[in-house]
Amino acid sequence: MKKITELNAVIITNEALKETLENIGWMTFISEIKRGFEQSALGQAVVPEKVYVDTGVSDMRCMPAYLPRYNPKYCGVKIVSVAPANKKLGLPTVLGEYLLRDAKTQQLVAIMQAEEMTAYRTGAATGVATEALSRTDSKTLGIIGTGKQAYYQAKAILTVRDSIDRIKVFNRSEQRARTFSAKYEPEFGVDIAVVNLEDAVDSDIVTTVTPATEPFIYSEQIKPGMHLNGVGADSKTKIEFDPKVLKKARIFIDDFSQCVHSGELYRGLEKGIVAKGDLISLGDVLLGKAKGRTSKDDITFFKSTGVAFQDLITAIMVFEGMPDKNKTK
């Protein structure tokens, strides 16, 4: 068996990927992810549906992509695995890697750890949606769930909405919320208040990043002018917002084929609360082919499921943006 080093592929760790993206900067990164949404809406992205493999105790998801208009030199695939029982074994419950290939020869050019990649691109996608759909005078950001993804969501949203002067965070574990506040308040430069769920929802922009399987935000909590980012519920079994919330909102999606099988939209469509015609492509909004926010009182809802073009753009930016001295074979 050949060793990886003999394949002449560069190995890029989570740490190296994170350092490279921070050097590139969030604004530039979000702008590039925005280009991906636009090209996807124009039909210029080759992004087959996710392939799922369920073993009964774990699952594996494969996400291939090719963006010939963005960069014809590369294609790639992300493989993400979830094994909940790993926690008892002292192993990570989520594992992943990205295989970046030469699009002409299919030679493997880089192998990247994908945990940080997923975190960054998910945050950046929310940044794109929040910039396009939220009120420009938004002052408060509510974040529900303070796990790993919460930092990246906050970072991206603060990048596109510098009007925000207060973040309200809620976690079922109050201590975890307090740890988040103490850790990131100095970096963000805004007040991070630990509040109850109702107070967190009472914000101009609300982002949910939880693994909830039952809804915890209801239509009576939603006020005119709010922008909502539903990030945590990326499958049929997960849900954060009661589907009736969608009845009050203009609904925007990252990918139609994925969103109709995830969380709020799956149940909303199943119950007839919303119709497929109610779903608006974020890419179409960015291109001016569809309307986004039409007034200060609109309630806008962005459903994020994570699309393979986002991973490919991230991989290309990191591979081409990383100094050669930091690349190991």
Image (cartoon, rainbow, N blue to C red):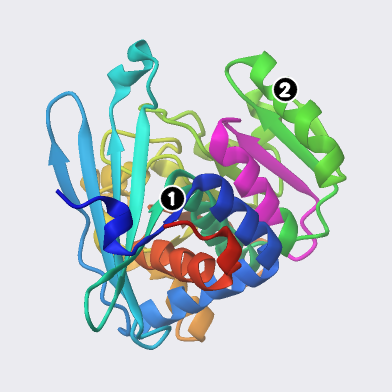
Name the side, left or right, on which 154 lies relative to 6. Answer: right
Name the side, left or right, on which 193 lies relative to 82. Answer: right
Label drawn at residue 179: 2
Establish if 239 lies above or below 49: above
Q: Quadrant of residue 78?
A: bottom left
The residue under label 1 is which amino acid type?
Answer: Leu
Residue 292 appears in the picture as rendered: no
The residue under label 2 is which amino acid type?
Answer: Thr
- For the point 59% across and 33% down, the residue is 144
**Which of these two is toward me, 89 or 59?**
89
Q: Is residue 147 magenta?
A: yes
- For the point 42% across and 49% down, the residue is 114
Categorize mark 2 by other alpha carbons within 10 Å: few (<14), some (14-19), many (20+).
few
Q: Is residue 194 magenta?
A: no
Categorize mark 1 by other alpha carbons within 10 Å: few (<14), some (14-19), many (20+).
many
Residue 45 percent coordinates (x, y): 31, 79
Label drawn at residue 268: none
**Secondary structure at numbered mark 2:** helix
**Which of these two is toward me, 270 or 113?**
113
Residue 280 percent coordinates (x, y): 40, 69
The magenta stretch is 135-157
Q: CA distance from mark 2 to mark 1?
A: 32 Å
| Residue corresponding to mark 1 | 246
